[in-house]
Image: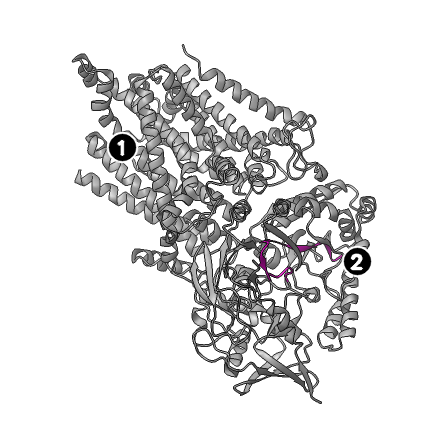
Amino acid sequence: MLDYLFRRIGSLLATLLVASLIVFVVIEVVPGDPASYMLGMNAEADTLAALRSELGLDRAKPQRYLEWVSGMLRGDFGRSYTYRTPVADMVSDRLWISLPLTLYALTLSTLIAFPAGILAASRRGGVVDTVVMAFTQLGIAIPNFWFAMLLVLLFAIKLGWFSAGGFAGWDAGAFAAMKSLTLPAVALALPQAAILARVMRSSLLDVLGEDYLRTARAKGLSRRQALLNHALRNALIPVLTIIGLQFSFMLAGAIIIENVFFLPGLGRLIFQSIAQRDLIVVESVVMLLVFAVVVVTFFVDLTYAWVDPRLRHGR
Amino acid sequence: MKLRSLLPGAVLVLVVLIAALLSFLWTPFDVTDLDIRNKLKTPDGAHLLGTDHFGRDILSMLMVGARTSIAVALVAVGIGMGVGVPLGLAAASRRGSWLDEFIMRGNDLVFAFPSLLIAIMITAVFGPGAVNAIIAIGIFNIPVFARLTRGAALSLWTREFIMAARVAGKNSVRISVEHILPNIMNLLLVQGTIQFSLGILAEAALSYVGLGAQPPIPSWGRMLADSQTLITLAPHLAIFPGLAIVLTVLGLNLLGDGLRDWLDPRLRRER
Amino acid sequence: MKRLIRFPFFLLLALAGAQALAARTEVTLGMQLEPPNLDPTGGAAAAIDEVVYANVFEGLTRFGPDGSVGPALAREYFIENEGTRYIFTLQPNVKFHDGTDMNADDVVFSINRAMAEDSTNAQKQLFANIDSVEAVDPLTVVFNLTQADGNLLFNLAWGDAVIVASESIDNATTNPVGTGPFVFNKWVQGDSITLKKNPDYWGEPAKLVKATFKFISEPTAAYAALMASDLDAFPTFPAPENLAQFDADPRFSVVVGSTEGETILAFNNAKPPLDDVRVRQALSLAINREEIIDGAMYGYGTPIGSHFAPHHPAYLDLTAQASFDPDKARALLKEAGHESGLTISLKLPPPAYARRGGEIIAAQLRDVGVTAEIENLEWAQWLEQVFKGKDFDLTIVSHTEPMDIGIYAKPEYYFQYNNADFQALMQAFNSEADEAVRTGMLQQAQQMIADDYVNGYLFQLAKTGVANNKLKGLWANSPTQANDLTAVYWDE
């Protein structure tokens, strides 16, 4: 196991290193100059040069790459070109919206998916199962940004229960803040809930088909008892895996939803920084998201390896 | 044999395909013609689904937009298969080799980037457009097919008929092409359908944020983006393109499920 | 000879307004874009000025709501030496928000900083004619010019020329310290900026106690925020399509004013086929302005026929010179040898006027046999490719700087209009002091570029503001990009 762990950590670090190189190279070749974006149409050549040197853009690219990477290792993400504030501060501000939003959405999707999946599995083939499955098919097919628009149309514009966008801020109190995250969370959660419910159902059915449960049922357990007492626990592993993957997916997938609702989260930060050619912010946020995905995948793999020793040897 | 998802899926997909093909020959109105005096009309006899902010016929735009969605998603899946399947076959045939390791690490790397981020980065470098949307979606499809192919091929390599082919002196490339590939075709077809539906969703998302096909080529995602500021004035502008996406994706998913049940009874789950 | 000129006093009176009793004293305004930082002397973003201009920072002179230039930190001025020497007398007892005094040294520092070699001022050309600035005594500053400059007072009114203090300017990006009637209070990045009343203001104090600028770029969200009364006003509402709905709602008033934004279909004058005046004329005639204003701006916007604001006294209505005439356009194209059609690029920056207007123009051009291939660009790409690289045939952009017809005298400017007569005319204009002569010259300039069909002139961008009925004193027009809150109050 230890050997496996070291190998996985090694490949994790290698992935991050290569990813950082790709991110840097790709983003540095993006056409457009942050200085000319900031100074606009009347800027003169020497003004631009002055700003470029003030921002450190005139230094060689390899040097900037090394500074960026070594800075990140020390927790220093550099300074934003446009905002002139530390990137780390900006990112942590935005994380206070993106992270709660993701967790909120994940909670909602789990709360919807678990009962739906269990219900469908326990009534396999019945009306409830058919209805649940039909809904999940629909849920998977709905683009979350369109669903978000419909939510805005109904709950913000027609009914006026929620605001159509923006973030109240945690200063306004937890309730107000959560309220402004509710529609986005629902929009983000529903398609994920559909996927999760399907995984829950099929995973339960798989477990129910296994020998020990057949034995348990032969011993006189009712189908429901078997399901809840034995099957659920064992079916949870694939489900938790999916939840883990959905976490990183939603953190990044919130990009579009944050744009629909105009939430000042990480996703909006990426779009805004690309438009402003605030390259260092783009690089750092992309790396952060890559880091989140890689680490979550790492833990998912570890869990699997722990549960199923065969996986530790050669993949 | 139950075909309850195959049939409705096939019907939905067929309707979209026919609409897209028909649009080459005929649409109710010319989608490049602007008619600003008749903008934002609600559905009526002349315009069955109403008109948009430039007075263009929404039904016509949906028909032509179907072409864009299908073309982008299809080519992207094609790229994913065309590159991913050979990679997967190669990795499986030299299991544990540096090639296998290299391919799988490469896959991990691509998976490490959230798909939308790849797309945003690519379009930031090369500019928005249908071709770049295709590349962006295509890149993300490569590891999906590579992994699937490798996994399925690995289990086939241990089977007796492959052993027999090996004994007969066939090299690994020939075995991969002649014996492995035909045996995983069904699996690829099913996954291809699912990836196709994901491609439609991805294209819509990219166009929605302005990174997909550029005007005047209609696309469903951009129709939704254009409708956003008008949602209080003309909700039908937001509803019809969304429905088109949902029905297409739903159709493809049902078709994929149905195909799986139909083609490979072993994969069929008890339902 | 010495001339003494006192600033007209009516401006201050007009700004004073009426005092209301026991009314609300806080206001929340919506803005579409968030400023990247809060230093108006270090960036071009209009959003910076929209927050701090006249509220936090003040210059020697300032723009009034009607676009006229009036006094601010300078009380009066004298002109000497044939217009090459300006002497400003400063307002006494002015303090920066950090409590330090504002005096002649700060003026010298601010202007020298903006002019300096390593300055990052986005409008450095404003100071081009200034040779040196000297402090004579704490309340007197002398500007020595290299040549007479009739625009100096106008130039010093810009947000890029505000007076800052050497002690605080380094932190102005996130903590601006000025002399204005409002003090910077708080910035929640990605959300809002709050200003508070400056109790020690040297002039007429503000009536509001607190003002919050909230940044909502998504028009639907802006619409909903106004409807839900989360915002009291949106001085420049981004979606003209929604204005009719606000107009119908008794809680709101829609104020349509003018801006300095001449929206043009720019031609690349140096690149074939647009180096041919017949082609440029043909494209100008192929455009139906009314349809563009209706389709892209929902009717808000004034047609223009040259690069000049219709509300300016020297404006000449030249719209008839390029009125919609597709037949003549086709004939001209034929004459220029493009009978079989023409394919050119149309590069569009992000604003709705450009994206929507571009689609309409592409359709109109298609009608006369010109294929315009649309390419949507972000601002950064637009600046790189179009503005700097001059790699374009057509583009649509709104030139929002006030009185900027002078850009046509720069042959290296992105549309590359090179006409020696026009350059000589502008040269003469810049050193002319007589208003009547200046007006004549401006009209001549308008005519000249209209005759050369330098660009396709579309419309003057309207300022479409939405505000709560009871909120008074917001600017109706936009002579510069600002939300001056000095005179804003609740009338209840």
Q: Nearer the viewer, residue A46 or B151?
A: A46
The image shows residue C277 at horizontal and vertical percentages of 78, 55
Q: Nearer the viewer, residue A206 or C222?
A: C222
Question: Relative to A131, does residue A288 appear above or below in the rendering?
Answer: below
Q: With A25 as the anchor, is A36 left or right in this view? A: right
Q: What span is in magenta?
A: C452-478
* Colour scheme shown: one colour
Q: Are marks 2 and 1 on the same chain?
A: no
Q: Nearer the viewer, residue A16 or C203?
A: C203
**Residue A29 showing in the rendered view:** no
In the image, is residue C467 part of the stretch drawn in magenta? yes
- Circle 2 packing at 10 Å, graded few (<14), some (14-19), many (20+), is some
Q: Amino acid at mark 1?
A: Arg
Q: Secondary structure at mark 1?
A: loop
Q: With A204 as the anchor, is C118 left or right in this view? A: right
In the picture of the structure, the residue carrying the numbered disc 1 is A315
Residue at the image position 23 percent from the left and 23 percent from the top: A228
In the picture of the structure, the residue carrying the numbered disc 2 is C318
For mark 2, name the chain: C
Question: Relative to B172, does residue C293 appear above or below in the rendering?
Answer: below
Q: Quadrant of residue C372?
A: top right
Q: Quadrant of the N terminus of chain A?
A: top left
Q: Amino acid at mark 2?
A: Leu
**Residue C57 showing in the rendered view:** yes
- Circle 1 packing at 10 Å, graded few (<14), some (14-19), many (20+), is few
The image shows residue A268 at horizontal and vertical percentages of 45, 49
